[in-house]
Amino acid sequence: MRQIIRKREKETESHIIDRNNLGTFYRYVNNRISYRNNIGPLIDDDGNVLTDNDQKADLFKEYLPRLALWTMVLCQTMTFMNCLIARIML
């Protein structure tokens, strides 16, 4: 049964890619994403475990600009669709 479901998912994904429609692509991806309310403990660069939401927010605030810069450099060498997929996978 699991193989049948996975095969159907692959067919659906291939169909969406073949259509080359960004709106359909984003709708599919957004429906597949599961949102969670809580973020578990994080470890900062010094190895400290962060459990406080404010500390975790500060850590993300420092990390995300570095990630965005890396994504921009990476995307300069990719095609448009590959760049979109890479951004989603990050």
Image (spheres, rainbow, N blue to C red):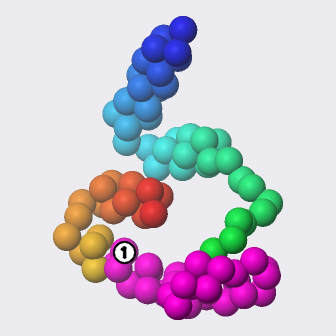
The amino acid sitting under disc 1 is Thr
> Which residue carries the number 1 mark?
71
Q: Percent from the top left, x then y, of residue 22?
A: 46, 49
In the rendered view, does 35 fall on the left or right side of 13?
right
- The foreground one among 9 and 2 is 2
53 is within the stretch colored magenta? yes
Q: Percent from the top left, x then y, of residue 10?
A: 42, 26
Task: Identify the residue at image location x=50%, y=88%.
Answer: 45
Q: SS class of the residue under badge 1?
A: helix
Q: Main secondary structure of the magenta part?
A: helix
User: Is residue 27 shown above or below 1?
Assistant: below
Q: Percent from the top left, x then y, of residue 14?
A: 37, 30
In the rendered view, does 20 fall on the left or right side of 55?
left
User: Is residue 12 shown above or below 57?
Assistant: above
Task: Identify the residue at image location x=65%, y=80%.
Answer: 49
63 is within the stretch colored magenta? yes
Task: Identify the residue at image location x=64%, y=42%.
Answer: 31
Instruction: Give residue 40's quadrant in the image.
Output: bottom right
Instruction: Give residue 57's quadrant in the image.
Output: bottom right
Instruction: Give residue 52's quadrant in the image.
Output: bottom right
- Range of the magenta residues? 43-72
Q: Is residue 34 visible?
A: yes
